[in-house]
Image (tube, rainbow, N blue to C red):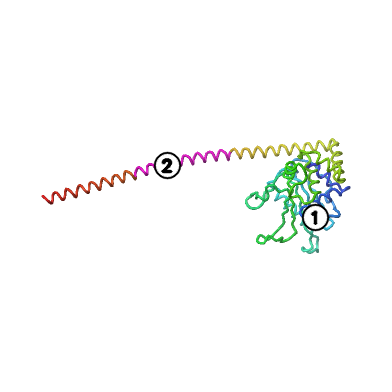
Amino acid sequence: MDYLFKRIFGNDDDKSRLISLVNAIFANKNIDRIVADIILINSALEKHNESDKFSIIDIMATLSSGSRVCIEMHLYGLGELKAKTIRSWSRASGEELEVGEKYSDQPPTITIAFTNGKVKSFRENIIYKTDKNKIHKLCMIMDCEDFSIFTDAMELHYIDMKAFAKAVNEAGSLNINETEDPFFTKWLALITHTEINDKTIIKYICENEEDIQMAVSTLARQSEDKLIRQAYLRRQDEIYFFNKSIADYEHRIEQEQRRAEQEQHRAEQAEAKIAEKDEALAEKDEALAEKDEALAEKDAQIARLLAQLNGNN
């Protein structure tokens, strides 16, 4: 879906789908912002190649409010995602300000990232309990003491497509937690349609939502184009082999950790046996010392008795 995402939502001839999607994302976090129009900055699809695995699915746009929005889809490379999105934000934010404008007049710069998994946050790459099944994460700059928003200049949205599809499959419907806006779930259901088990959910959405029905029609037309389909399949192969290499690497790391844990366990058992042996020897030495002390006391008593006998004689 990442290859076709830009062809469906980055169409300069029909921006209604992208406007609907962006409005749904904002509404899902109760952000008081309605997008009336979008100006696409890079509507042309970049050339597909293996080294350019990120920018091929970027959509850069300017909202009617003046805010710059960068929309990205990441099916892998989650370890670099935070740095990547912050870099995209800083680049878009830097391009926003023109000569003579005040920094305070600059509207928020927004990055929206669709991810195929969790984006770890907080210290030491720990996933907190609140992040465990989080579908839509909104990150801004805040005061670390009172947790107030320090500035709205940075707005980062991370949408976990895998968590969404899992929640829908478990619920058997789009009535899932953490989704405030119905259109958010509908668009996300379309984007993740291959991962949703109950296809009647997608069918119902298409029958009742015109924008989504048009998006599906665009998807169908794109799928009929042989060149586009070949590029899409190459893209899927690239993602498959990349994910497989990551899975193989993680499997090797897991095996090495398991071996290290086993060796550590054996070392601890050996140390415990040595400690038990040392303790037994120490107890034996202590018993011998007590015996020697008793014998010495006995010898002293005998010596005193002999001295008394000699004195009486």
Label 1 and label 2: CA atoms lie apart by 69 Å
Q: Which residue is mark 1?
A: 68
Near-viewer residue (130 or 231): 130
Of 43 and 24, nearer the camera is 24
- Where is residue 138 shown, x and y percent of the image? 73, 53
- The quarter of the picture where residue 202 lies is top right
Mark 1, mark 2: which one is toward the viewer? 2
In the figure, is residue 99 to the left or right of 275? right
Q: How dense is the environment of label 1, judged by Cα within 10 Å: few (below 14), some, or many (20 and up)?
A: many
**What amino acid type is highlighted by mark number 1?**
Arg
Out of 212 and 120, give the one closest to the viewer.
Answer: 212
Q: In which image quadrant can residue 283 be found?
A: top left
Span colored in magenta: 256-285
Q: Which mark is residue 276?
A: 2
Question: Residue 146's spot in the image, x, y percent?
Answer: 67, 62
SS category of the residue bearing label 1: strand
